[in-house]
Structures are given as structure tokens and as C-alpha cells.
Amino acid sequence: MTYQNYSLKQLQQIDAAHHLHPFTDHKELREAGSRIITHANGPFIYDADGTEILDGMAGLWCVNVGYGRDELADAAYAQMKELPYYNSFFKCSTPTPVLLSRKLAELAPRNVSQVFYGSSGSEANDTALRLVRHYWALEGKPQKNRIIARKMGYHGSTIAGTSLGGMDLMHKQLGGAVPNIVHVMMPYAYELALPGESDHDFGLRAAKAVDDAILEAGADKVAAFIGEPVMGAGGVKIPPLSYWPEVQRICRKYDVLLMLDEVITGYGRTGEWFAAQTFGIEPDTITTAKALTSGYQPLSALLVGDRIAATLVEKGGEFYHGYTYSGHPVACAVALKNLEIMEREGLVDRVKNDTGPYFAKALQDQIAGHELVGEVRSIGLMGAIEIVRDKATKERFLPAGSAAVTVRDHAIAQGMMLRATGDTMILSPPLIWTRETIDMACERIAKALDLAQADLRKR
């Protein structure tokens, strides 16, 4: 029996009876009932009532080539017919992860040429943490195991991913984090810059927090610094251009490895294949997932720099780590076809030279002047809208985060899917968006802001 045999109410009742959702107040959801998304095409999703919604989040930062790509379904079907599964253990491999690894090495920064597969960004970050600490042990420095991360960073929901991340509410539910992980300030100029401080100077000050943390622990104790090139789930916080070059200089000065989490920014989001290339970073590891398959299959790829890989191969012996679905042949087949589509259609160049700049201008021209908006910012096809009570003072509405939720709900009612993170509205649309789609999105967001303003001014 297919879902078409059930009414919306029946699906909602079954969902409430058996389905525990991620990042959800389950009592609240079950009282309201889930929005059931039934199908999608291009940049649009459709719910069980037939409502068309422009997807401003690419699913969950992932559907870069848009919905309804028959080529990806065909690639999965063909691989399933030929070989649906075999593992990468026992000195075995299958063709698709072999070919995908070569392709990723071609696209990655020049010092990165090895790949380890999993099924999610959380798994990739778990692997990266374990690999970095193992690297230093192989180099005879097991005490060099502290990781410096950032407040409000997001690195997944496993125990290790949550520990690496800097989300306080997630830490409170963890009941004990992975040890030797510390968190420093984030490069969030809108709230953290000092009066009169330039973006350049703020970027250097935020980077100095990494330097200070290394000196506090002792460089001989610090394994790596991990960060998202652009902080995604924390609110699309884009660092000043001075930040990453200084962080890289600091890491090299103290011989601290540099770990990038590109689960969100990888595969074209910032106008390059990787944000490492956008910001001119040469990392030691890059965690990726999401847009690697455009979300059509679960797959992650930890890209490993040559320095770590050489030590692992020459000194490591057996690496006691892996997953049942590492290098899953069907997921890798879909990834290969997804990357082929992106190259053939020039989506990355389009973001860099056309839609990305147009998106930035549209946000400035159509959204930034609204009374509720303290700031808009974007890079590539990734943007944020700060919701404030007072533009001049940056005062927020109370309770914290409630205003953005009000805007979000009005946006969805206007046919525009956005996400609210704290007091920030965030966007990460499919890379197939055109100038016309961007204008449509801004029109709907502006209307949602007007409606939200009427509600919020009643408080």
C-alpha cells in the first residue's frame, strides 16, 4: 500500500504515534500535526494539501541540483541492478567509490587527495576527530590531542559531533562530552564587533582567540582547530576576509592541523567547489556530505590531506575504524552523476558569476531596508537576515528567537520555505535558482516581513 491510500490526517496520526523527529519539541509537533511533504520538482516542494512552496533551504542545505532529476534516479537504479551493495572491508572495493575518490581529488584543494566515506556529516566529523588524534599518536605525540572549536559551531549530532560543536543546548542534553575539546569566540561581527572596529580588525581579533587558546594549552598539546568556513546552522555567520588567512597562519606557526567542516559549504555553495578555495585555505581535512549527492542518497566524504594520509599509510598499520556503508556503491554512483550534472550545467560558475552576486544585490535592495531587518549578508547562494526590534541599537524582540519564528511561519504561508535560527532567518537554496527565482523569493520574504511586523508590533 502506498501513501496515496492514506488521508493527510491518517498520515499525521501515524507520524505522531511512531515517528520521533530530529530537533523537535515532540509534544508541540504532535498537537499541531506534521506538514507532510509528498513530492517536489525543480526548486519547489509540495505538501499533502497540494501547496507549492519555494524551497529556500535546498532540503536541509543539500539539494543543490534541485528536485526531480531522473538522471540521479536512473543512476541509482542501474547500480542497484548491477551491484546493490558490497562492503569496503576485507581488502575489497567496488567501482563507484574508486571513481568518485579520483573525482573528488580532482576537485579538492591541491594538498588533498584521499577520501574516507560514511553516510552523514556527523560520521565524517567523528572520523576526522579520530583520524587527527590518531595521526599525532603515530607521529609520537599522543599528548597532542586537544581540539579547538568555536562557540555556536555545528559539527553534527553524534556524541563526538556534538562535542566538537559549540551549541550549549545540545551540550546540556549530552550528559558528558568527548574530552579535550575547547571552544573560542565565533567570527560574528554583527553582534561581537566593538564600536568603531573595522571588519578587518575584527577578523584578526576573532582569529587571535585561536592563538590564545593554543598558548593557554601549550602548542605541544593542541592537535587541531576545526571550523566551518561559513557557520551554517549557527546562522550563516560569514567571517571577515582577514579571518581565515590569519587562522591558517596561526595553525602553521604552532604546527596545529586545520580541519574544515564543509558539510554545508561544499560542492558549489560559495561559488567554488569548496569554500576552502573561496577563502584560500589549505586544510588538512575537509568533511563533506549533503550536496555531494544533492541529498538523493545519504553519503559523506572525509577528504584527507596528503600529510595525514602519508603518515596513516606508512606508519599506521590497520586503522580500526569504518562503517557498514562506507563507500556504498549506490550512493557513490549517485554522487558521480550529481557532480557530472553540476559540471555540465556550470552550476558552480553560475553561483560565482551570476546568481550569487544577484542574490546579494537583491537582498540588499529588497530586504535590507525593512524595519525589522538589522542586517542582510550572503556569500554565493547562502544568506542571512537578522531580525531586530530596533535597527539602530540592534535590540532584539523578546523572548529571544520568537520574532524569527514569526517571520518564518508567515514566509511558509506565503509559499517560501525559510529556516529560523535564533533571531536570524537563513537561506541556502538549490543552486538551480535563477534571477527570476531570487526575485520571487525576495518578494515573498518582504511580504512575510510586513505581516510579521504587524504581529510583532502588538507586543
Image (tube, grey):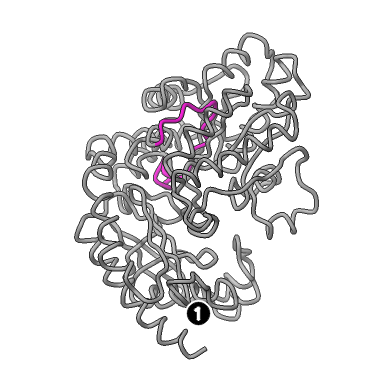
> Is 51 on the left or on the right of 328, as rendered?
left
Give residue 46's position: percent from left, percent from top.
35, 67
For label 1, the residue is 9
The magenta stretch spans residue 289? yes
> Is 359 on the left or on the right of 34, as rendered?
left
Which residue is painted at 35% across and 55% down in the image?
429
> Is 139 on the left or on the right of 387, as rendered?
right
Residue 254 visible to the viewer: yes
Q: Nearer the viewer, residue 341 or 396?
A: 396
Q: Quadrant of residue 138?
A: top right
Give residue 256's position: percent from left, percent from top.
63, 26
Residue 120 visible to the viewer: no
Q: Amino acid at mark 1?
A: Lys
Q: Where are the magenta residues, as a range?
A: 279-296
Secondary-structure class at tag 1: helix
Residue situated furthest front in the rendering: 196
Give residue 104's position: percent from left, percent from top.
41, 27
The magenta stretch spans residue 126? no
Residue situated furthest top in the rendering: 314
Q: Nearer the viewer, residue 205 or 243?
A: 205
Which residue is painted at 78% across and 24% down in the image?
143
- Number of numbered labels in the structure image: 1
> Is 26 on the left or on the right of 401, as rendered?
right
| Above-or-below relation of 37 to 459 | above
